[in-house]
Image: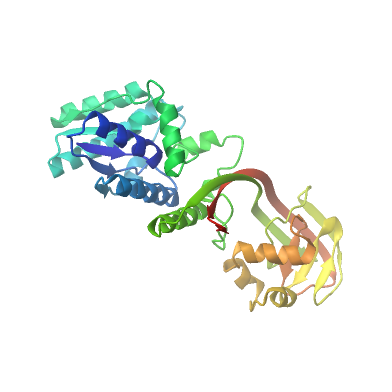
Amino acid sequence: MLVHICCSVDSDYFIKKLRQTYPNEPLLAYFYDPNIHPYSEYLLRFSDVKRSCKKLGVPLICGEYDYESWLSGTKGLENEPEKGKRCEYCFDFRVNQSAKKAIELGESTITTTLLMSPKKNFNQLENSLKSVSERYGLKYLAIDFRKGGGTSEQFNNAKKEKLYHQNYCGCLYALNAQRSQNEAWELISPLGAQTQPASIKSRLKLYKKVRKCEKLKQDYELNRVKILNYRLKNARLSFDGVVMDSYFLFYSYINKGFTRFNAIENKNIFYGKDEVWLVSLTHFNHLANFNYKSVRELIYSPPKLKAELHIRKKLCGKNSLNPIIILDKILSAKCEIQIDSVLFHSSVEKLKVKNHKF
């Protein structure tokens, strides 16, 4: 039987239940999900599915990430609600390719772990499996393991197995709809590719460490903690109307988003209005033993966030929100600062290994 895989939380439990129900049926896992966006999220989900299938001893094949093909079929369906026509199209698209792969590999039956998802319409999935199977002359399995407390067991299993539990369905449209009141931060990356808290990049790194722990047979815990998170959308600083290269440290925040004052030339730090700290690049390099030649270099190749936050702590304290702005030179001029930054709470996972914390 070829089992289309969507994510580890659904697939791990679904495959276990399949084995209990059909103990003599060989299973082949097929991860085919070009709907997942962005690509980094796709890699993260596949990585955890791979980890799960390896533990279960189930062979896994990864399909092509043909996102453009999937996307072209969504035209006119962009504003469809969850469980609407766009979801029907998405199911058909993935189940159809799964059927083709089953025929290619000599499998006679197909199913999908999407049947396990509490956010998906079971009837839509069953209809998709039925119509595609009839088209290709295959058998299909549409079994509802959600009934009788299955969903609760599934989430307990995910917690026990320390699986990556994504916080949105997967596609661009669902993400935007789910984040209607907030920014879809999963789609935004900083210019300098710095790894920021609760980003997909940070989750990729976390689960890479998880796999390392399991390989080394180390006991570990994954615990959720709430943090004050931050994102800088855009910012600029000008001296006498001339925009300067400037680097705004993480957590730089001005409530009004704008301030102006008269700056005075300084080789190290100038303290401005609204708790602004202007810091020269020379002093910045001295504080952390960096060797940046220009602020432009700093913008495109920033230090790791941990190092940047250490500098903030040195300057004005660990929990400070002062706008700290790095400049090539601090000039005597009329200084204007515009900053669009956001503070918000995030739930993030922390990895603890015995007495060591990553």
Residue 256 locus on image (x, y percent):
79, 47
Question: Which one is in front, 195 or 203?
Answer: 203
- Considering the image in quadrants, where does the N terminus appear? top left
Residue 186 locus on image (x, y percent):
52, 47
Determine whether 6 is above or below 356 in the image. Answer: above
Determine whether 106 is above or below 304 in the image. Answer: above
Residue 95 locus on image (x, y percent):
26, 35
Q: Quadrant of residue 35?
A: top left
Give me the residue at 84% from left, 55% from top: 274
Determine whether 110 is above or below 203 in the image. Answer: above
Q: Is residue 1 left or right of residue 75?
A: left
Residue 59 locus on image (x, y percent):
24, 47
Give me the residue at 76% from left, 75% from top: 329
Q: Quadrant of residue 194?
A: bottom right
- Considering the image in quadrants, where does the C terminus appear? bottom right
Q: Quadrant of residue 157?
A: top left
Q: Is residue 270 left or right of residue 177?
A: right
- All told, the count of numbered labels is 0
Determine whether 357 is above or below 134 in the image. Answer: below
User: How does the figure colour the protein chain or chains?
Assistant: rainbow
Q: Is residue 46 left or right of residue 351?
A: left
For residue 333, say whether it is visible.
Answer: yes
For residue 73, say whether it is visible.
Answer: no
Q: Is residue 122 left or right of residue 272?
A: left
